[in-house]
Amino acid sequence: MMQTDSRAQAQVARAVRVQEAVAAAVACGLCPEVTPERGVEILAAPKPADFWGLGTATARARASELVDDPQWRGRALAWISAYRHQHGHGPTWKTFREEAALWPDQVSANIRRIVLLVLARGGHLDGTRTPFGLRVREERVRVV
């Protein structure tokens, strides 16, 4: 019974985070494409399919190569943080993928998508399953 209660609490907490993130995007003056109607569509949309396993070995290797480059990763994470600071909500995956200044030449859309997955799996991102919730994961300092 306790496990069911904690699961229900987690679902409620997630629903609140999603509603808050979508409301922030709708209210953002820098994102006129996110209308109240679009916000309702996002909230009512079925959960998207899980894309964690897609991509060829070559595409995954190229994505990992980018993420493993500390200079590129630092620029990408700084861009996400700056976007969140400026807008009051996180960018969509599409917005991140389409930010041309972040990407080296000849990086395909598929590799750009996989990069987000590698960043998330690597512990660099939070909010990947919340619309407009994308953010850089804060490092947690352990007190010994």
Image (tube, rainbow, N blue to C red):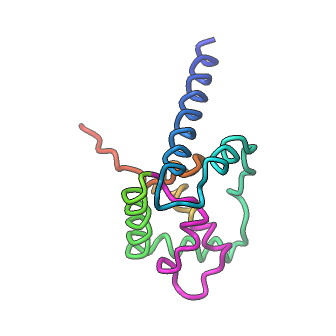
Q: Report whether 76 appears left or right of 95.
A: left
* Quadrant in the picture for residue 40: top right
**Magenta segment: does it hold 108?**
yes
Query: Where is residue 51 drawn, in percent x and y?
Result: 71, 57
Q: Which residue is depicted at the point 61% across and 29% down?
A: 11
Q: Report whether 44 appears left or right of 76.
A: right
Residue 90 higher or lower than 45, as above or below? below
Q: Which residue is depicted at the point 59% across and 49% down?
A: 131
Q: Residue furthest bottom?
A: 105
Chain part drawn in magenta: 89-115
Query: Where is residue 72 drawn, in percent x and y?
Result: 43, 75
* Quadrant in the picture for residue 108: bottom right
Q: Which residue is depicted at the point 48% across and 77% down?
A: 102
47 or 61: which is nearer to us? 47
19 or 38: which is nearer to us? 38
Residue 43 higher or lower than 59, as above or below? above
Quadrant of the drawing holding the N terminus: top right
Residue 87 higher or lower than 22, as above or below? below
Query: Where is residue 118 drawn, in percent x and y?
Result: 56, 62
**Magenta segment: does it hold 97?**
yes
Q: Residue furthest top?
A: 1
Quadrant of the drawing holding the C terminus: top left
Residue 110 higher or lower than 11, as above or below? below
